[in-house]
Image (tube, rainbow, N blue to C red):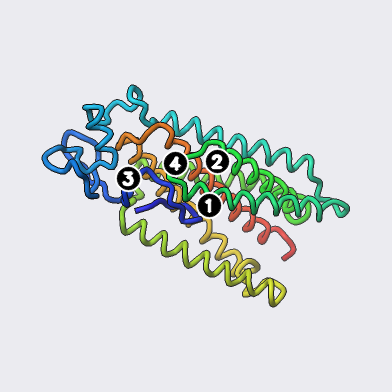
């Protein structure tokens, strides 16, 4: 099975057609192993590992990733920090250099939309690549930062003062809460959880797409899913979906490390976590704009 991202990407620590995370079953004496087909199947306790072929080539199971070029938690943290750092820096520069006063808002907004569309395309390209491309991921983060910087400035300066900082704090709070709940075992990520989240996400995105079409061709706010009481409800749902995406991301990282994923795949973890955090931030920003704005 694949990962959790809002664009339903194919990124993941996987081999063949399977995703380790949701096929995992612990076995005595080793890390969790999956149930996907493996040419080395037999009595070997690591035979079902998506990286089993690589492990057997090295002659040892993946207990020591630091010495065999495999992904570690430090790798994930460093690459995620780098990706988010690029996003934050470009967002700050966009906020400072692209004013949103009456004389410049159209130009700034146009640049932001262009950057956002290119970032979306790059995100899909990386999602469907078999290997991580650090340059592609960092470029995505930079362009996404431009989009978020201008959008945040518009909301903060023209709709709801202080909204950007509140959205940042809300996103951080959700991240910490989900991490604590996941590590404490309060959230169990399995096939049922995955299926529920992905079905809910597809329904959510479909409704938002329909609402956008109605707003474009019918004017106003379309079906009203992004304003008033319905807007608040769907904003809360969006944040909850983002929290579920985070839990899936944490599971994917945990399984990737347990399976001995190559170190370069830490960039995939950074890419996925960044996309999920952007999702949560945007939903918080929209919620705050509805609650504090004039709409």
Asked whether 189 or 167 is in front, the reply is 189
- Dot 1 crowding, Cα within 10 Å, few <14, some 14–19, many 20+: some
Residue 15's disc number: 3
According to the picture, the residue beneath numbered tag 4 turns out to be 131
Q: How many numbered circles does the render carry?
A: 4
Residues under numbered marks 4 and 1 in contact, where contact means CB atoms less than 8 Å apart: no
Residue 137's disc number: 2
Residue 276 at x, y percent in the picture: 51, 49
Which residue is found at the position 21% from the left and 27% from the top? 59
Asked whether 207 or 43 is in front, the reply is 43
Residue 241 at x, y percent in the picture: 48, 57
Quadrant in the rendering for residue 199 = bottom left
Asked whether 3 or 44 is in front, the reply is 44
Q: Quadrant of the C terminus?
A: bottom right
Task: From the image, state whether disc 4 or disc 2 is nearer to you.
Answer: 4
Give the Cα separation between the discs numbered 3 and 1: 20 Å
Residue 166 at x, y percent in the picture: 64, 47
Give the Cα separation between the discs numbered 2 and 3: 21 Å
Image position of 215 with respect to 161: above or below: below
In the structure shown, which secondary structural element does the residue marked by tag 3 occupy?
strand
């Amino acid at each position: 099975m694949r990962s959790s991202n809002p664009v339903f990407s194919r990124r993941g620590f996987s081999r063949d057609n399977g995703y380790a995370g949701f096929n995992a079953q612990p076995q005595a004496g080793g890390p969790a192993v999956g149930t996907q087909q493996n040419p080395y199947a037999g009595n070997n306790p690591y035979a079902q590992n998506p990286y089993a072929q690589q492990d057997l080539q090295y002659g040892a199971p993946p207990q020591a990733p630091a010495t065999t070029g495999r992904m570690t938690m430090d790798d994930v943290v460093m690459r995620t920090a780098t990706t988010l750092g690029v996003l934050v820096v470009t967002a700050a520069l966009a906020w400072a250099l692209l004013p949103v006063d009456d004389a410049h808002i159209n130009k700034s907004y146009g640049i932001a939309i262009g950057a956002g569309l290119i970032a979306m395309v790059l995100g899909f390209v990386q999602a469907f690549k078999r290997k991580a491309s650090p340059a592609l991921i960092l470029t995505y983060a930079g362009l996404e930062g431009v989009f978020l910087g201008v959008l945040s400035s518009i909301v903060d300066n023209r709709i709801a003062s202080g909204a950007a900082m509140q959205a940042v704090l809300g996103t951080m709070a959700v991240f910490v809460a989900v991490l604590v709940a996941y590590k404490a075992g309060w959230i169990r990520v399995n096939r049922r959880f995955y299926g529920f989240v992905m079905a809910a996400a597809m329904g959510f995105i479909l409704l938002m797409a329909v609402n956008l079409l109605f707003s474009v061709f019918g004017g106003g706010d379309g079906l009203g899913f992004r304003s008033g009481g319905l807007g608040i409800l769907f904003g809360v749902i969006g944040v909850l979906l983002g929290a579920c995406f985070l839990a899936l991301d944490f599971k994917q990282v945990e399984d990737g490390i347990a399976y001995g994923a190559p170190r370069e795949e830490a960039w995939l973890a950074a890419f996925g976590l960044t996309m999920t955090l952007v999702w949560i931030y945007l939903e918080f920003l929209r919620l705050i704009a509805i609650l504090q704005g004039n709409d």
